[in-house]
Image (spheres, rainbow, N blue to C red):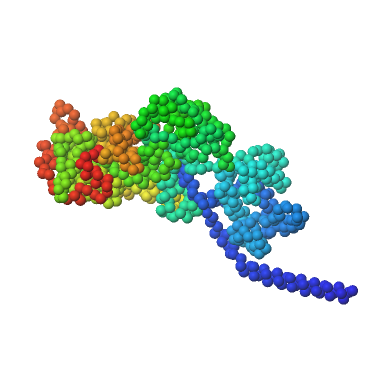
Amino acid sequence: MIRLIGYFFGLGCLLFLGVAAAAAIYLSVVSKELPDYEVLAKYAPPVTTRIHAGNGALMKEYSRENRLFVPIQAIPDRVKAAFLSAEDKNFYNHPGVDVGGLIRAVAVNLQNIGSGRRFVGASTITQQVAKNFLLSADQTFDRKIKEAILSFRIEQAYSKDKILELYLNEIYFGLNSYGIAGAALTYFDKSVNELTIAESAYLASLPKGPANYNPFRRAEAALTRRNWVIDRMVENGYVSQSDGEEAKKQPLGVVPPKSGPSLFASDYFAEEVRRQLIDQYGEKTLYEGGLSVRTSLDPQMQLEARKALQNALVDYDQRRGYRGPIKQIATSQDWGIELAKIPGLSDVPEWQVAVVLSVSDQEADIGLQPRVDAGGKVQTERKRGTIAAADMRWAFRAASGKVAKSPSGVLSAGDVVFVQRTGNADSTTYRLRQPPKVQGGLVAMDPHTGRVLAMVGGFSYAQSEFNRATQAKRQPGSSFKPFVYAAAMDNGYTPASVILDDPLQITLSNGDVWKPTNYEGEGGGVHTLRFAIEKSRNLMTVRLASDMGMPLVAEYAERFGIYDHMNPVLAMSLGAGETTVLRMVSAYSVIANGGKQIKPTLIDRIQDRYGKTIFKHEERVCDTCNVSSWQNQDEPVIGDNREQVLDPMTAYQVTSMMQGVIIRGTAAGKIKLNTDIAGKTGTTNDEKDAWFVGFTPSLVAGLYVGYDSPTPLGRGGTGSGLAAPVFNEFMQAATKDQPPEKFQVPAGMTMVAVNRATGMAAQPGDQGAIMEAFKPGTGPATSLQVIGGGEAAPQVAPEEILRTSPQANQAVSSGSGGLF
């Protein structure tokens, strides 16, 4: 018996040694295949890039994984306690693998064999870090062994807090949300430090299976799992019994998922910033780099710009008549289901989609589009309202020209239309609306810094993402003329210089004749350059450009950034080229700030994920701004290193002339502000685009209105009739809280009373005399000297008039000159 026992003992020892040797060989082989866990020290997960307005408000987020990295020190103890209770209560005590927990899991799984219950796991937080960062998710024995080995090594290399930090910033929570900070914002619209016990417990329940505890589709299961986590927090001593019971009484409190930018009306601005970031840093950095971008957007000014342009577009469109419903749906059964499928305009919340249920001669009964919850279910409530005849009278005239006498002649049951509530939130009366076909773009800018304060790229971003403020290249018409006159003022002419306004014809070398005319055909005689720009005289501008030479005009246009390369032909002096609203506003800013070059920008500063500034728009230098203490030194001076691209005296002369446009010229009576204002109208050939660009001493704004496919705007579609009122509405709102400002006359200039008709010094008793600004060494003429007087019709080649673009060719070949 003893020998038999000894035999079995020896056999057992040999077997043990064999198994141990095999295990050692296996572990040695597996260990050689392990990834390098030291990469955890360089952990840089994909992090959300956040775009902020100038006041810090969140505009937009861009990410492939919705994640914000937060250090462990910034995560509250109650949040950490929730995850430890849910996932690994012995985290701070085990060496990477919880042996006790593993034994318990094995015992439970043995009991569950054949019961149909899911096997329970025993992975620690460290093991989950090893799996998520370094291994695949394959459910294999090899992977579990590798996971355990890596866990031991990770525990030896990193602190517990570091491991927990990695875990909480990496895990997936559902709804495209990664990491605890991203999950807190996604589910509760809160920062991590604002989470309650109940909210922390719910988030801690999600890593086990986000889809299983979806708050919108499986609310009951989510509540049960959350309460289980709260009970574990109480059991582990993290939360008192009373606090735990109180937390379990709370509802889930999950907020519906948000779509679109957080800051209303910022869509076009945010999209332009996104494009610039991609151009500068690439898509990977934008969507994974965790940039923090502070833009120049003024949210209140943006709202005012949106309102002014939208009002004008809707008003113009309604005057052209009703074009019909969005579509037709059946109303005999539940119309809400079909109506819910029709997209509205998400960035025009004042408007709702509705279906006409019945219509009479007095009103139309409508059903409003029902809400759809986060789970995609259409709400059962069906709200209704009415459209009175008076609130849709504009639609009695159809775009086709047909005229109706009552609502029944316009609408039919089943018509899907846009409506806008007429009263307060409880009102059931609505007015009929339709998205306008006409579009436009508006930009407002600080002329001293180039910071874009507001940008509107069209009626609705949901309707069209094309940004007409930056992407649409349009003819500026006569809004370009101030730069022709700036070139003149810089090269020996004065506002009192006199030029001929008689009919002009230019014979081309191929025998064709170009006959530019003034907008309404009027003209004749001689007038000053001030009169020419105030009344937007085409004939005088062409003569002036011809007298100076178009290469000089082209040089100035390129210097101001209106064009990169301007074709130096005469038609361009009337604004026949193509440029953008942003470029025009930037060019006017140079005049407004006294001739300093600026770089228009939508971005003030960019910081990387660690808070390091990697870009800032401000390039001025202040060498003495950051001293450690005050030692009676002089006040710091910020050096102005901007290039002077226009004589400050010239800038003031052109500004003064454009003040005349507001007071006596083409915009007379259209602009009413309690501050100094200068500007210029612009109407392209056949009234296809209406422009106005203007400025106060501290704000420049410009806009155009026109169809995306250039089409005549019709009667009243001029810069004066259509664009100037938009500018006025916006500027009144933008400057209402600012004290009145005055344009400052540069030192050294001489103010002389001038006869507005002759340009010579005014005599006592002259009516209509005006104070004109002259540079040193210049002054009013002592005798009448007319530019273009006694001229012969020049013989020029067609290419000196025409350029290759169809728009410019049409502006010239039509013979109307019509740029006003």
Percent coordinates x, y for residue 223 in the rendering: 66, 42
Please name the residue shown 46% across and 46% down the image.
51
Residue 36 appearing in the image = yes
Location of residue 547 (image quadrant):
top left
**Quick one: which residue is furthest to the right in this view?**
1
How many numbered callouts? 0
Please name the residue shown 24% across and 41% down the image.
481
- Up the image or down, 37 lies above or below 781; here it is below
Residue 648 appearing in the image = no
Viewport quadrant of the N terminus = bottom right
Percent coordinates x, y for residue 600 in the rendering: 35, 46
Percent coordinates x, y for residue 217 in the rendering: 62, 43
From the viewer's perspective, is 696 left or right of 297? left
Location of residue 53 (image quadrant):
top left
Q: Nearer the viewer, residue 322 or 256?
A: 322
Viewport quadrant of the C terminus = top left
Location of residue 458 (image quadrant):
top left
**Quick one: which residue is furthest to the top in this view?**
362
Q: Nearer the viewer, residue 312 or 805?
A: 805
Q: Nearer the viewer, residue 672 or 474?
A: 474
Q: Nearer the viewer, residue 28 or 403?
A: 403
